[in-house]
Image (cartoon, rainbow, N blue to C red):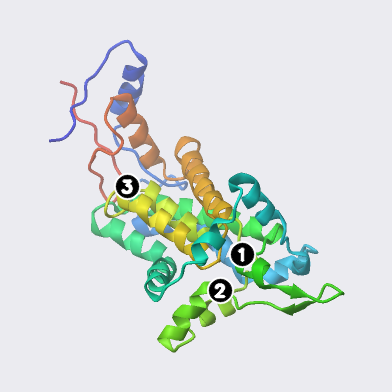
C-alpha cells in the first residue's frame, strides 16, 4: 500500500507540501527541457567518471607536466600510520597464514571489482530502480576522480613493495616483488599469468591510499545493494580482508576508501547533485515522515505526482 500523505496546516511541513502541490511534477536537467531521457542523465553523470578515466590514462604525462617524480614515492608514511593506529601490521598477520582455498576466496572480489560499476548499474535497471543509475554513477565517478588525484600528487607504496624492495648504496632499486603480490600464487595454480597481466600493465603503480578496491563496494553498499545492507557490509569486509591478505593494501587504505565513499555520498545527498528530482523526492518524503527507502513510483521522465489532499 502506498504511504498516506498527512497534510499539516500552518507548519513548516505544510510549506513544503504546498509548494509541491502547486508544482506537482518535478523535472530533471539543466537545459530547461521538460523531459530528460535516462540516457541523457547517464551521460551527465559520466562526467566525473570521464575525468577519472582521463587522469588515469594520462597519469604519467600529468606527473611530468606537474613536475611530480614517482621515484620519490612515500614508503614510510603508511607503515608509520598503520602501526601508530593499530600497534601492529594487520596485513602481515593475515598474509602469514595462506592456503589455496583462501587464495581463491581473495581473488573473487578482486576479479569482480573490474565489472562492479557496470553490473550494479544493470542491476538497478533490472529491479526497477533505473532512476538511481545516474546518481550512482555520479557518486562513484567523484570517488574515483578524487582518489586518483590523491594518488597523483601523493603516491604511496603498497605493502608488497615496502616489504620486498631492496636498494643499493645509491638508493637505486635492486629487486622488488611483482605487482600482483599475493595473487602470484593464484597465477601459479591456474598456470596462467592472469593477475600478472592485470597489474603488470597498471599505470598507477603507487596508488595504495586510498583504496579504490574498497571504495567501490562501499559506494554500492550506500546505494542499497542487491542482497541488502548486510551483504553490502560483508562485501566491503571481504575485500578489505582480501586486500590485506594479498599484501595489496594496508588497513588504513581500506578505511580511507570507505571514508571517501561516505563523504562523497553524504555531500552529494545533502548539498548538491544535478538530478534534482531525486533530491525533491527525498525532501518531500522526509517532511511527510515517509522513510526515504519507501517505494515511491517513478517514471522514465522522473516525474513525481503527489496525491490529492484528503
Mark 3 Cα within 10 Å, few/some/many (few <14, many 20+)?
some
Q: Nearer the viewer, residue 162 or 94?
A: 94
The local secondary structure at tag 2 comes to helix
Q: Nearer the viewer, mark 1 or mark 3?
A: 1
Would you identify the image quadrant in which residue 164 lies?
A: bottom right
Q: Nearer the viewer, residue 270 or 204?
A: 204
The local secondary structure at tag 1 comes to helix
Would you identify the image quadrant in which residue 176 lies?
A: bottom right
1 and 2 marks in contact (CB < 8 Å): yes
- State the image coordinates of residue 94 (x, y, percent, origin top left): 49, 62
- State the image coordinates of residue 81 (x, y, percent, origin top left): 66, 49
Which residue was labeled with disc 2?
Answer: 181
Q: Nearer the viewer, mark 3 or mark 2?
A: 2
Q: Nearer the viewer, residue 267 or 303?
A: 267
Q: Is residue 36 visible?
A: no
Residue 159: mark in rendering: 1
- State the image coordinates of residue 71 (x, y, percent, origin top left): 77, 69
Which residue was labeled with disc 3?
Answer: 229
Q: CA distance from mark 1 to mark 2?
A: 9 Å
Give the residue at x 35% y 60%.
121
Question: Which mark sits nearer the N-terminus, 1 or 3?
Answer: 1
The local secondary structure at tag 3 comes to helix
Residue 122, above or below 225: below
Question: Which mark sits nearer the N-terminus, 1 or 2?
Answer: 1
Amino acid at each position: 500500500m502506498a504511504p498516506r500523505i498527512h497534510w499539516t496546516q500552518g507548519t513548516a511541513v505544510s510549506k513544503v507540501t504546498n509548494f509541491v502541490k502547486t508544482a506537482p511534477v518535478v523535472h530533471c536537467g539543466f537545459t530547461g527541457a521538460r523531459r530528460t531521457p535516462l540516457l541523457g542523465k547517464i551521460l551527465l553523470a559520466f562526467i566525473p567518471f570521464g575525468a577519472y578515466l582521463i587522469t588515469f590514462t594520462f597519469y604519467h604525462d600529468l606527473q611530468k607536466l606537474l613536475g611530480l617524480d614517482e621515484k620519490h614515492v612515500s614508503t614510510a608514511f603508511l607503515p608509520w600510520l598503520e602501526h601508530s593506529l593499530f600497534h601492529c601490521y594487520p596485513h602481515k598477520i593475515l598474509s602469514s597464514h595462506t592456503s589455496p582455498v583462501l587464495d581463491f576466496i581473495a581473488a573473487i572480489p578482486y576479479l569482480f571489482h573490474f565489472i562492479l560499476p557496470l553490473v550494479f548499474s544493470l542491476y538497478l535497471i533490472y529491479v526497477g530502480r533505473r532512476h538511481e543509475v545516474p546518481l550512482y554513477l555520479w557518486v562513484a565517478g567523484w570517488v574515483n576522480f578524487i582518489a586518483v588525484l590523491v594518488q597523483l600528487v601523493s603516491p604511496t607504496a603498497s605493502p608488497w613493495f615496502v616489504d620486498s624492495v631492496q636498494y643499493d648504496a645509491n638508493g637505486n632499486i635492486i629487486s622488488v616483488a611483482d605487482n600482483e603480490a599475493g595473487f602470484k600464487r593464484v597465477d601459479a595454480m591456474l598456470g596462467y599469468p592472469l593477475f600478472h597481466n592485470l597489474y603488470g600493465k597498471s599505470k598507477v603503480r603507487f596508488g595504495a591510499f586510498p583504496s579504490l578496491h574498497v571504495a567501490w563496494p562501499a559506494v554500492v553498499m550506500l546505494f542499497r545493494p542487491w542482497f541488502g545492507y548486510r551483504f553490502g557490509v560483508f562485501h566491503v569486509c571481504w575485500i578489505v580482508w582480501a586486500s590485506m591478505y594479498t599484501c595489496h593494501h594496508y588497513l588504513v587504505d581500506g578505511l580511507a576508501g570507505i571514508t571517501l565513499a561516505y563523504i562523497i555520498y553524504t555531500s552529494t545527498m545533502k548539498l548538491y547533485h544535478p538530478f534534482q528530482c531525486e533530491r525533491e523526492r527525498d525532501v518531500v518524503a522526509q517532511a511527510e515522515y515517509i522513510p526515504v527507502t519507501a517505494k515511491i513510483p517513478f517514471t522514465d521522465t522522473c516525474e513525481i505526482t503527489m496525491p490529492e489532499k484528503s
